[in-house]
Each structure stands twice: as C-alpha cells, then as structure tokens.
Amino acid sequence: MASATLDIEDLCAPVLNSTQRALLDQVAGVPVDLRPTELMRQAAERTGLHDFGSDEFQPRLARYAEAVESDSGNTNLNRIILQSRIVRLLTNRLLFTDLLRRYPEIHDIEIDRPIIVVGLPRSGTTHLVNLIAADVRRRALPYWESQEPFACRGEGPDVNGTDPRFLRSIAEHESATALTPLLAAMHDRFPQAIEEEVELLDLDFASYVLEWHVRSPQWRDYYYTFDQHRHYGYLRTILKALTFLRGPRQWVLKSPQHCEQLGPLLATFPDATVAFTHRDPVAVIQSAVTMLAYGDRIRRTSIDPDTLVEYWIDRVERLLRACVRDRDLVGADASLDISFHHLNGNEMTILDRLYACNGTALPEQTRESFRSYLDSNPRGKHGQLRYDVERHFGRTPSEIRSRFDFYFSRFDVREEV
C-alpha cells in the first residue's frame, strides 16, 4: 500500500487546533525560573543528592539558561519545557556522579570498537543506526534511556519488569503526538527508537543540541570555544556507566555533531569504525527547517522562515566544511562513505562492508534480524511529507546548493531537489 502524501499548508503561518491553543493558553501565566541556583536546587530536591561533580560545568549551565531566557520568541510552554529539560539534565548529572562514587570500577570498563554513524541531520543516520541496533550483540541508546539514563535510587522495574522511566517516555511520546501529530512523518522519536548520544553529552552542557530548541547564535558561538576532547571524555565515561548497568556489548552511536568534532571523536574512540552518510544539503536543509517550523507552532510566538532557513543553511555549511576538512583523520580501513541515494535497498551490502571494517562477523541470525527490521520499517512508514523549500522559505534549491560545491566535489552526492 502506498504511503499517504502529507502537505502542511499552514507551515509558516500556523492555524492552531483547539488542543494546541488550549494548552498554550493554560500555561501562559505559569512562572518559569531559569536561575541556575534554582535549577540546581530542584535537581537536588528530586534526587536527594548534592554532588554534581566538578563545578567547572557551572559557567556553561549559566550560559545555557541565559540562551533560553534571552530568546524572546519562545512561548511560555517552550520555556517550561526547556526549564524541565535543564532540571532533568542536572538530575541525570547528580545520579551519574553518585553512581561513579559508589562503583569506581566503572572507570575500568573499555568501550571497544564502536560503530559510529556520522552525517547531517536527515541524511539517513537515524535509519542506519536503528538498523545496526537490530543486532542484539550491540549496545545502543534508546530514546527513553537518553532522557533518563540513570534511575533514581529506589526506583526500579515494576512486578512486570517494566522500567518506570520507559513508562514516562511513553506518556511523553503520546502527549507530543497528540500535540504535533505530523512530526512522526519527519522524525518519530518513540521510546524505543535509537537516539543520539549528544543527549548524554548535554549533561555536561557542552553539545550543540540547544540549537534545535532555541534561536541563539550566541550559544553556537560559545559552543565553538569548548575543548571538546574533555567533553567527549565525559561522554565516554557515561557510556562506561551505561555499559556497567546494561551491558557489556559493543556500542553503536550516531550524531550530526560529530561532523565538526572528528578530532575529539577519534581521540576518544580511537578504535571506532565510522560510517559517514552523505546527502544533498538542499534536501537536508528543507527537511530540517520544515520539521523545526512545524514544531515551532507550539514553541514560538511566531515563525520567521527567513531567519530559520538562513541559520540552518549556515549551520549545515559549517558542519560540512569541518567534515570535509577532517574526513581523512579516519583511515580508509576504519570507515565507509555511504551516499543517501545508495542506502535504501542496499543496506545488507553496506552492512557487510561496515562490519568487515569493524572486524565483526555477521552470522545468519544477525542478518535475519537486519532483514526483519527493514521489512518492518519501510521508508515513509508514517506517511510521506511534501517538502518545498522555495514555497515555504523563499529559497530556490540552486541558490542553496551554490553554497556547497566543496561538498559535492568531495563526496558522491546526488542532487535531489
């Protein structure tokens, strides 16, 4: 059966439904306190813990909260969501620090030969990492765990073995789907879906993730000043802790941020196998800004398509220029370049090559798991969305593509738009 084609007629001038309007009105007057001391106090109260580890993260926390506070375009609902996010990150940091204190042997765990998927948002990274995670020998990061990687002490699975963190993630997903139902057709972050590990790096308030939640070039520029070797080392320790709790297995990881952090990534995971995904930047940008604009109907008081598209054209260019510059840091025997137009339908051949680079066998049972995943997750499973960067954002494909000649000349990328 063909997937339905979806078209968001009111993308940049949204007409809110009754559910969206009622929620925005309901929370419009709720006070939102973004003072770092108050955010830390709430996290401490939630956990009963007070040791956040080294206090060197606090200046970054202050700038993180300031980025949210200074974005005058946020709805109060988004301010509440982001306040909750920061408290959750601080809660996770407290629990992580406590776990390391109680089990110092975590530091001795090795992260052995991970497969790391590196590519632009919307370039097939999600498809590929979820496919690889179908290998039961691999350790991956499902969305529910990325949000609450460490349980509060005394909070364990119920009599049926169900983790309360998972149940909370289900409730969150159901609420998000009811509020913005078309997001599933763009990027369905259901609880079991594999998520980016930069969500864990954000416990150190050192990732690019905040750029997806607020309009803050100041945060981007501040992020560029970080010594990411240190922060990626913090991420590695989190992965050790998660391996200790639910492992041991070889990890599969992924994030677009790694495009511009290949030096720190390889220094942190020197035996990694890296799968680079490549796609027409115009397709990537129009997909990303469409997804953001659709979510902005509840996040922002109004939608500015010009500012949105210009920011992400520039941001994608920065990611790709860094990737082209540093691509050869990863040797040919430990990496694979995967063109988006070759990915769908050729996954098994790609996996053969990738696993050979990783030095890992592919028994028939694992191959069957891959085939089962592919059969159950066809492209457009939740419907195909009609994207049109010129109609919605006033930029022609050729105008955008002219910024990326350096990328087309380096990799096998096919024009899509």
Image (cartoon, rainbow, N blue to C red):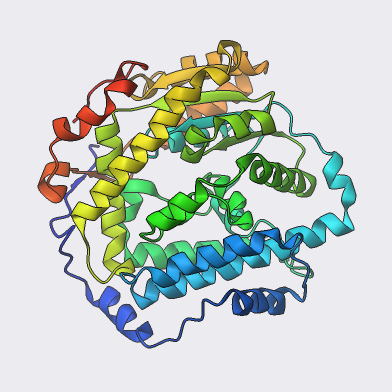
Q: How many marks?
A: 0
Out of 224 and 52, give the one closest to the viewer: 224
Q: Quadrant of the C terminus?
A: top left
Name the quadrant containing residue 378.
top left
User: Residue 47: in sight, yes or no?
Assistant: yes
- State whether residue 190 is above or below residue 236: below
Out of 216 and 280, give the one closest to the viewer: 216
Residue 188 lies, in percent from the top left, at 40, 50
For the point 45% across and 18% down, the residue is 337
For the point 58% across and 64% down, the residue is 61
Q: Quadrant of the N terminus?
A: top left
Residue 137 lies, in percent from the top left, at 68, 31
- State whether residue 382 is above or below residue 181: above
- State whether residue 84 is above or below residue 283: below
For the point 56% across and 67% down, the residue is 62
Is residue 108 left or right of 386 when viewed as pictured?
Answer: right
Is residue 24 left or right of 253 when viewed as pictured?
Answer: left
Out of 360 and 167, give the one closest to the viewer: 360
Residue 35 lies, in percent from the top left, at 55, 77
Is residue 250 left or right of 107 when viewed as pictured?
Answer: left
User: Residue 151: in sight, yes or no?
Assistant: no
Out of 38 and 137, give the one closest to the viewer: 38
For the point 51% across and 68% down, the residue is 65
Residue 171 lies, in percent from the top left, at 50, 67
- State whether residue 330 is above or below residue 119: above
Is residue 174 left or right of 286 when viewed as pictured?
Answer: right
